[in-house]
Amino acid sequence: MVKINIGGCSSFVKETEYKNYLEKALQAFDVLESETGAGNDFLGWKHLPSGTPESLVKECEDIRDDWKSRGVELVVVIGIGGSYLGAKCAVEALSHSFARELRHGGSMDVVFAGNNLSEEYTAELVDLMKEKSTACVVISKSGTTTEPAVAFRIVKQHIEDTYGRAEAAARIVAVTDAHKGALKTLSTQEGYRTFVVPDNVGGRFSVLTPVGLLPIALAGFDIRALLAGAAEEEKALSERSEDNAAVAYAAMRNLLHSEYGKAIEVLVSFTPKFQYLGEWWKQLYGESEGKDLKGIYPASVVYTTDLHSLGQFVQDGARVMFETVVTVEKSNRSVIIGSDPQNLDQLNYLAGRHVEHCNAMAQLGTKLAHIDGGVPQLEISVESINEKTLGAIFYFFEFACGVSAYILGVNPFNQPGVEAYKKNMFALLEKPGFEEQTKAIKARLAE
């Protein structure tokens, strides 16, 4: 379902070099498939598409139907990092771009919180909850991660104050650890319905668990189709072959990085619907590969919009990057450019053309210009944007990430560097237990 075209790199690399990196990628594929590599206790994501039970899908749909029957208009999904980016990506990609303005009846708006510590954002979320009948999905293994914990305390208080504790228990769902943690304890005490974050699935690989499936279902989308598309990709990528799209992608990106000094990968889309695909992908690859002083820096853009901002740098700036373009072959909608008698804008030569034709020609023109300017380009393509293809994209990038990180020589499934800022933040907030760190950091800041 996901196709790859590496032709945009052929003028930059030698065929013998690519063959060498294909062999490296196949060896990394073997490590991933045999589950013998670093972090192999976090490989539960590999068979989620084919192994997710119908009962789990039904539970997600039952909550959707229950909340609709209660008149819920707004669902606040609380989580940070992998606990929200996959769902946010899917909701943005699959929704009508102006759904809120059109106010389609019968659907619930899904918004996201707990991914920042902005007081203005939080206050404006409270404003919104006061206007709409609200429910909440809180996603956290521990229940003590600062950003989501702060947001949940505020959202929970609003729901309890507005609807009472008994009704609040029906309007709050927790996605958390099966046995332990503050959120699990609270869920048991209050009687929240709960879903389990599998112990063997890390946050950035969790979009096909209830972490992603429940919010996507609540937003009104077909999670069966999402899983079906991912399952097709799971099957396709299980084949040990040089034609395996994930193997080819991992091989070429590591070749460009290791042999040609391409330190930055820019994920490109030509549709604003994929803006948050870029955000999800950046976490997936940034946290998986960026360690031990190694890694390819992940960046993302949406063209043609960003051609009018970052395009100059990509075309003529430092030659430190390559592009991976996610192409959508067919638009789901049709708009044809009309003719104008005055033709003051000089666009009559486009009369009768689809807008998407212009977009496709802009993509082709950009490809040629950037390759001519010294920027290698890979292309990942799907037929159209829907639940099935999105599931395939999610699985493709996850599988390719595992292969690529093993080529690079790092553990794809840990993230030791994430904790550094937290320790400083806790010390500055004077969290109990951090007294010595608070003293030390205050002395450092006073120097």
Image (cartoon, rainbow, N blue to C red):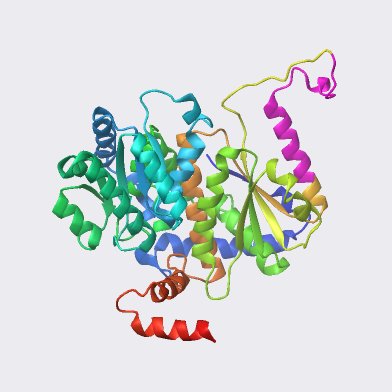
Is residue 339 at least partly visible in the picture? Answer: yes
Q: Is residue 435 above or below residue 177?
A: below
Q: Position of residue 208 (x, y in %)?
A: 38, 47
Of residue 205 and residue 118, the one placed in the foreground of this image is: 118
Q: Is residue 201 above or below residue 311?
A: below
In the rendered image, residue 361 lying in the magenta stretch gets the answer: yes
Q: Quadrant of residue 127?
A: top left
Q: Is residue 243 left or right of residue 187?
A: right
Q: Is residue 419 left or right of residue 447?
A: left
Query: What residue span does the magenta drawing correspond to?
Result: 342-368
Question: At x 48% / y 44%, what residue is drawn?
Answer: 89
Is residue 28 at least partly visible in the picture? Answer: no
Q: Quarter holding the C terminus?
A: bottom right
In the rendered image, residue 277 lying in the magenta stretch gets the answer: no
Question: At x 50% / y 28%, what residue is drawn?
Answer: 101
Question: At x 49% / y 64%, what residue is drawn?
Answer: 288
Of residue 271 and residue 126, the one placed in the foreground of this image is: 126
Q: Position of residue 235 (x, y in %)?
A: 44, 45
Q: Position of residue 99 (x, y in %)?
A: 48, 29
Q: Position of residue 370 (x, y in %)?
A: 78, 50
Residue sitting at the far top: 341
Question: At x 66% / y 61%, what residue is drawn?
Answer: 264
